[in-house]
Image: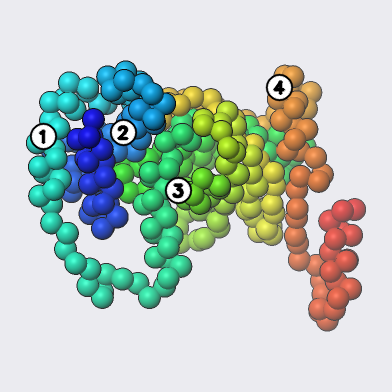
């Protein structure tokens, strides 16, 4: 349906021009969560189904299976009204005060908004596997990746093995990498925990591999291998919060978990740094640090 394509492209244009999803929703009469689901999930899936050769009705029915808050009857019945409302929204020109002087920050902001359009195939709940820094065990921790409720960015929620819940965001580097960023501590302290996941050439990958960096208990930086295994396409927060995280020792693992353990928990899967007494700061300190960490 050409009308759906025009609606999608107009929303994309408005978002690119800085119009908030909440404002767009108010003008169209859709709740923000419904319009966000329509824009980020339903319409991209519908267009992909059309490209695969599906008929219009079948393509739309299949796309609507990915969400539970969009009615086909309401969507089709409001196409004309929605188009008129979208094209009636005026774009205010940006003033100089609206633009920051930091090109890098501007790029990150654009990437946050643009990632919404690329996250469809990767939204859902995952179970992650990585080595624990506090014991000889594997961390098993759930993550939820989904468009934020306001439609402005991709939100990531993480329940760690020690009982804490972190809220962060994801950035897509085209279809090559996904960056996930959290602050592990409460404000104002900044302790970034970030993950870089390599995106495979696969339509809906069953797992994602990557590296993550954080601080150890002495606030020394550490990098580790991590594996994200897809559990469900569901983006329900209630369902996600019911998922449990834990630490598992090797003798507690089932056969599949042993594969994950061997992939993530070897000595070569962790890179550490630490401060050593070095009042003269000579080149010899570099090898002394590696020897100390590898001992």
Label 2 residue SS = helix
Which quarter shows the N terminus?
top left
Nearer-N-terminus badge (1/2):
2
> Which marked residue is nearer to the observer: mark 3 or mark 1?
1
| Residue 89 visible in the snapshot | yes
Observer-nearest residue: 233 or 135? 233
What secondary structure is found at the residue carrying circle 4? helix
Q: Are marks 3 and 4 in contact (CB under 8 Å)?
A: no
Q: How far separated are the C-alphas under marks 1 and 2?
A: 16 Å
The residue sitting at 28% across, 48% down in the picture is: 12
Pick whichever of labels 1 and 4 is earlier in the sequence. Answer: 1
Q: Quadrant of residue 103?
A: bottom left
The disc label shown at residue 43, or none: 2
Is mark 1 in CB contact (under 8 Å) with mark 2?
A: no
Neighbor class of circle 4 (other Cα within 10 Å; few <14, some 14-19, many 20+) is: few
**Mark 1 lies on residue:** 80
Instruction: Tell me the quarter of the picture where residue 134 sits.
Output: top right
* Mark 3, residue position: 169
- According to the picture, the residue beneath numbered tag 4 turns out to be 256
Number of numbered discs visible in the structure rendering: 4
The structure's colour scheme is: rainbow
Q: CA distance from mark 3 to mark 1?
A: 34 Å
């Amino acid at each position: 349906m050409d009308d759906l394509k025009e609606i999608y492209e107009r929303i994309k244009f408005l978002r690119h021009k800085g119009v908030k999803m909440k404002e767009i929703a108010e003008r169209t009469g859709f709740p923000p969560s419904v319009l966000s689901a329509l824009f980020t999930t339903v319409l991209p899936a519908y267009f992909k189904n059309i490209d695969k050769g599906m008929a219009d009705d079948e393509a739309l029915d299949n796309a609507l299976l990915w969400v539970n808050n969009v009615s086909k009857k309401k969507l089709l019945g409001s196409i004309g009204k929605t188009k008129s409302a979208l094209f009636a929204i005026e774009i205010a020109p940006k003033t100089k005060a609206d633009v920051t002087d930091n090109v890098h920050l501007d790029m990150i902001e654009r990437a946050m908004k643009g990632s919404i359009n690329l996250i469809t195939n990767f939204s859902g709940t995952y179970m992650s596997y990585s080595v624990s820094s506090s014991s000889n065990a594997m961390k098993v921790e759930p993550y939820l990746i989904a468009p934020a409720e306001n439609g402005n960015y991709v939100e990531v929620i993480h329940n760690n093995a020690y009982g804490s819940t972190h809220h962060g965001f994801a950035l897509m580097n085209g279809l090559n990498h996904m960056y996930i960023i959290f602050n592990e501590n409460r404000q104002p302290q900044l302790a970034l925990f970030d993950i870089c996941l390599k995106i495979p050439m696969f339509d809906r990958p069953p797992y994602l591999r990557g590296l993550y960096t954080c601080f150890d208990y002495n606030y020394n930086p550490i990098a580790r291998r991590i594996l994200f295994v897809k559990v469900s396409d569901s983006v329900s927060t209630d369902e996600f919060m019911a998922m449990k995280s834990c630490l598992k020792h090797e003798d507690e693992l089932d056969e599949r978990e042993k594969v994950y353990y061997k992939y993530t928990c070897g000595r070569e899967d962790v890179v550490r740094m630490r401060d050593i007494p070095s009042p003269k700061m000579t080149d010899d300190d570099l090898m002394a640090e590696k020897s100390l960490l590898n001992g």
